[in-house]
Amino acid sequence: MAEQTIPPGAGDHDRGGGRGVEPARPGAGPGAEPKPDAAVVRDALGVGVAVGLSGFAFGVTSAGSGLTALQTCVLSLLVFTGASQFALVGALAGGGNPFTAAAGAFFLGVRNAFYGLRLSQVLALPRAVRPFAAHWVIDETTAVTLAQPTRRGARIGFTVTGVSLYVLWNLTTLLGALGAEAIGDTDAWGLDAAGPAVFLALLAPMLRTTRERAAAALAVVLGLGLLPVLPGGVPVLVAALAAPMVLYVEGRVADRTLRREAR
Amino acid sequence: MTIWIAIALTFVGCYLVKLAGLLVPAGALERPLVRRLAALLPVALLAALTAQQAFGDGRELVLDAKAAGLAAAAVALLLRAPFLVVIAAAVAVTAGVRALTG
């Protein structure tokens, strides 16, 4: 993951995103060089396999929350966006009614719409393919796709990540649901730490400039600060406002600098 | 039945938002500000999710063994460890801390 490079046409280039404030990353390759297909496939499989295997943790958690193996597997097959799935079974286990439980999961899923906005630019998919590709628009496929320097690489990355993650996520969900009783307390095995670790690994390569870091830091403050006061799923959406807020401040600072330099 | 209703609603809602993102006309995204925003939104969302999953339990903030696991993942990332090693480090350290602290 850490070797992934910057996608072309990422909004960063139109206002000096590459103005040399990137962190020094020893060994990181140059950003715009073409990347061999095999390297893209390797990166994509790395994410697809690692995250796909964490379907096991979902299967165990879901079965432990009182869902049947069939319900657990249908969730992974049809919803296929991990954070929403975890949120749904968590809410149902806590005795939530189906509508509020689904609303929380839905709010968490709304971020995939923003990913889709970026992906449709980068992938340039034919309209007929989009309804099928949509099912795979999730954190991991987005991170791998946006990390590729070329459109060909992006399409390969999206497809390989999508296929490998979908197949493994569903297989390991089934195994987890069936094996939940045998394992006992999944928290004792530390499996609940897999989720945040996955998100952190996906986020890390994106924190290239001050802009990204400021947005991430502000989002963490908003997400944690609002967690106790807003219904499940909503704090994450409010935290997304960190992005426009950072851009607004950045714009104000840039305007002031321009005016000063205009003399 | 209740659970099936929740599953159906979640499926339809989550699929439609995924599709909506892909179907927005490309022209709407040509403006530089929109492009910068679309690039920055995933950063904010992932950061908030990471923090909530590590330090949140329902609507409560908690500081438990998961924090140690997340720190281990961060160290592994700084050392440029492969993806699976990062996840494994988080899981192993979390389990280890729980085993030690009971």
Image (cartoon, coloured by chain):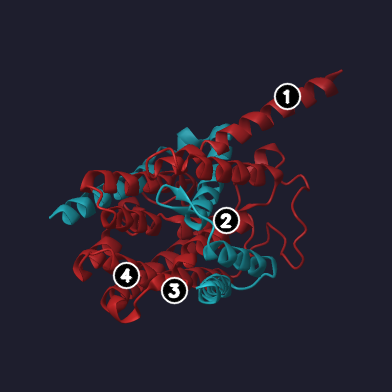
Chain colours: A red, B cyan
Cα separation between marks 4 and 2: 24 Å
Instruction: Give me the chain letter of mark 2.
Output: A
Please tell me whether mark 1 sits on a helix, a strand or a loop.
helix
Cα separation between marks 4 and 1: 51 Å
Say the numbered circle drawn on residue A52: none
Q: What amino acid is found at the position of numbered circle 4 in the picture?
A: Gly
Residue A149 visible in the shown view: no
Q: Measured from the top left, where is residue A55 in percent x and y?
A: 37, 69
Q: Circle 3 is placed at which residue position?
A: A188
Cα separation between marks 1 and 2: 29 Å
In the rendered image, the quadrant that contains the N terminus of chain A is: bottom right
Instruction: Give me the chain letter of mark 3.
Output: A
Do badges 4 and 1 share one subunit?
yes
Q: Measured from the top left, where is residue B65 in percent x and y?
A: 54, 65
Q: Residues within 10 Å of mark 4 (few under 14, many from 20)?
A: many
Q: Circle 2 is placed at which residue position?
A: A203
